[in-house]
Image (cartoon, grey):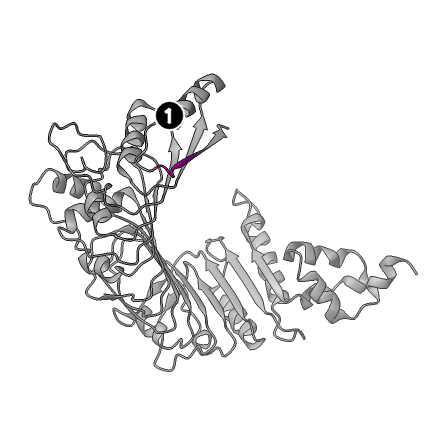
């Protein structure tokens, strides 16, 4: 008996499990092998269905191709199929009239829910009115992971109950039924550990996140929001990016370990703030106070500038041990001295680059402003042991900045520099030798240089 016969004699359930380890497209293609394999692909428990490749670039035959796709999904998600569907990823980008039908989409969702789906990822692009999410989805006793993308409307009712849901991802979905639909939804997920909310449209958005089980939270707004309150005492990871125009009435994140902030204002409004025209920057004081127990903090250059104009006072970051700073030659480091002074236990300081806007407000943290006055640098009292510099270009200004760091940081043990080889090997070698010869305040300080080749 040859190998092909041995595999073909395996039970259908086992074959279905084997096919679950390959892509759905490859699993379906096995139906061409023989009659024995013709319907085995319907037993696959992990399905990834994406119609992007099925839609032609022109309108010719589009309707026919799309109807074939719809018929294929109907068969694949037939309610009479015998196996359970553990994971379903369904992405439809058709968006043509007479194409994807919302009632059929809801039927598909109900079918997989009946089969005990654990992981559901839906992203639908439609023309016209977006379909509401079937209410059955909010009563699932099996869902562990749920992602809903554009093309759905959420209106949770009072009987929402998702007892097993641990991950929830909402990507630009429509909310109806009040200002705090997300908060209401979260309150009915008792074991939710990860929440991702992304909004790419210009809509008013209000949310109050209150959860004792939540451990990871990622919020992204490409436009604006009205208000966000956060009460998650067991949250360990928080990422927030996008434009800030709203308020943070209450933020309580006592167990936070890592936070990544990439917050910005509209550039025209920010320019007015810089020029002192009376414009009011976003009020993020409650947010900063709410994350003061963080251990690892990442701040973009926009956030660093926003902090300077929004927070005249900075809380004490007693637990902060690692701080990374973004770089942008149009943004200054004005808040950096206060941030370093208020981080008494900081051990690792990372710069994504040394480019920043020249200002007279950060002279004790850098050398971008010449002064004859004797200034006690914020670096001199710092406990930083590890300094990392990424995207080092080897300019004179950068070399002077490195000299300043090495002379002012008394506890340095290791300096890591990552540079890109933009010139000849000889010039790069000379630049590295110059770095190695710089004077240092700490006798323990060692310098490591990593040279990356430019592609």
Q: Looking at the rendering, which quadrant does residue 20 occupy?
A: bottom right
Q: Secondary structure at mark 1?
A: loop
Foreground pick, 228 / 417: 417
Where does the image place residue 191, in percent across and percent down from the top left?
A: 43, 75
Where does the image place residue 299, in percent across and percent down from the top left?
A: 30, 47
Q: Which residue is mark 1?
A: 437
Against 405, residue 29 (above or below) is below
Mark 1 Cα shell of 10 Å, populated few (<14), some (14-19), many (≥20): few
Where does the image place residue 226, in percent across and percent down from the top left?
A: 21, 60
In this orientation, does residue 266 appear? no
Residue 202 is covered by the magenta coloring? no
- For the magenta stretch, what is the residue range? 443-447
Position of residue 225 in the picture relative to residue 97 (left or right)? left
Secondary structure mostly seen in magenta is loop
Against 150, residue 425 (above or below) is above
Position of residue 421 in the picture relative to residue 19 (left or right)? left
Residue at 50% over, 56% down: 92
In this orientation, does residue 280 appear? yes
Question: Quadrant where the N terminus lies?
Answer: bottom right
| Total numbered circles | 1
Foreground pick, 265 / 33: 265
Find the residue positioned furthest to the left: 278
Where does the image place residue 272, in percent across and percent down from the top left?
A: 12, 40
Against 218, residue 211 (above or below) is below
């Amino acid at each position: 008996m040859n190998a092909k016969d041995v595999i073909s004699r395996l039970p259908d359930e086992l074959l279905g499990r084997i096919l679950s380890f390959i892509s759905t497209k490859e699993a379906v293609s096995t139906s061409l092998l023989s009659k024995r394999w013709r319907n085995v692909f319907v037993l696959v428990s992990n399905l990834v269905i994406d119609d992007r490749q099925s839609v032609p670039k022109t309108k010719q035959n589009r309707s026919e191709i799309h109807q074939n796709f719809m018929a294929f999904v109907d068969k694949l998600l037939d309610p009479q199929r015998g196996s359970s569907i553990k994971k379903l990823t369904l992405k439809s980008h058709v968006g043509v009239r007479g194409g994807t039908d919302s009632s059929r989409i809801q039927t598909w969702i109900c079918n997989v829910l009946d089969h005990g789906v654990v992981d559901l990822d839906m992203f639908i692009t439609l023309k016209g009115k977006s379909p509401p999410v079937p209410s059955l989805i909010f009563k699932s006793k099996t869902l562990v992971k749920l992602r809903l993308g554009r093309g759905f409307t959420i209106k949770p009712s009072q009987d929402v109950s998702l007892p097993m849901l641990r991950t929830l991802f909402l990507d630009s979905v429509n909310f109806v039924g009040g200002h705090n639909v997300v908060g209401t939804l979260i309150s009915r997920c008792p074991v939710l550990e990860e929440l991702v909310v992304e909004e790419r449209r210009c809509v008013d958005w209000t949310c109050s996140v209150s959860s004792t089980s939540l451990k990871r939270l990622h919020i992204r707004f490409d436009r604006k929001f009205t208000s966000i309150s956060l009460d998650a005492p067991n949250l360990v990871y928080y990422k927030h990016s996008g434009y800030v125009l709203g308020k943070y009435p209450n933020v309580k994140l006592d167990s936070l370990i890592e936070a990544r902030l990439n917050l910005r204002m509209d550039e025209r409004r920010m320019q007015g703030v810089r020029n002192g025209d009376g414009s009011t920057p976003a009020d993020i004081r409650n947010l900063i106070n709410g994350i003061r127990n963080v251990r690892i903090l990442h701040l973009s250059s926009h956030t660093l500038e926003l902090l300077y104009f929004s927070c005249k006072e900075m809380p004490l970051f007693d637990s902060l041990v690692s701080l990374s700073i973004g770089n942008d030659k149009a943004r200054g480091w004005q808040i950096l001295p206060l941030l370093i002074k208020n981080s008494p236990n900081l051990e690792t300081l990372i710069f994504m680059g040394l480019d920043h806007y020249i200002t007279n407000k950060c002279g004790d943290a850098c050398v971008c402003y010449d002064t004859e006055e004797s200034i006690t640098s914020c670096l001199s009292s710092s406990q930083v042991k590890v300094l990392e510099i990424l995207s080092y270009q080897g300019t004179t200004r950068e070399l002077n900045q490195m000299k300043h760091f090495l002379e002012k940081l008394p506890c340095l043990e290791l300096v890591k520099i990552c540079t890109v080889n933009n010139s000849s090997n000889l010039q790069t070698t000379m630049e590295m030798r110059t770095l190695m010869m710089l004077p240092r305040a700490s006798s323990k300080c060692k310098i490591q240089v990593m040279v990356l080749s430019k592609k």
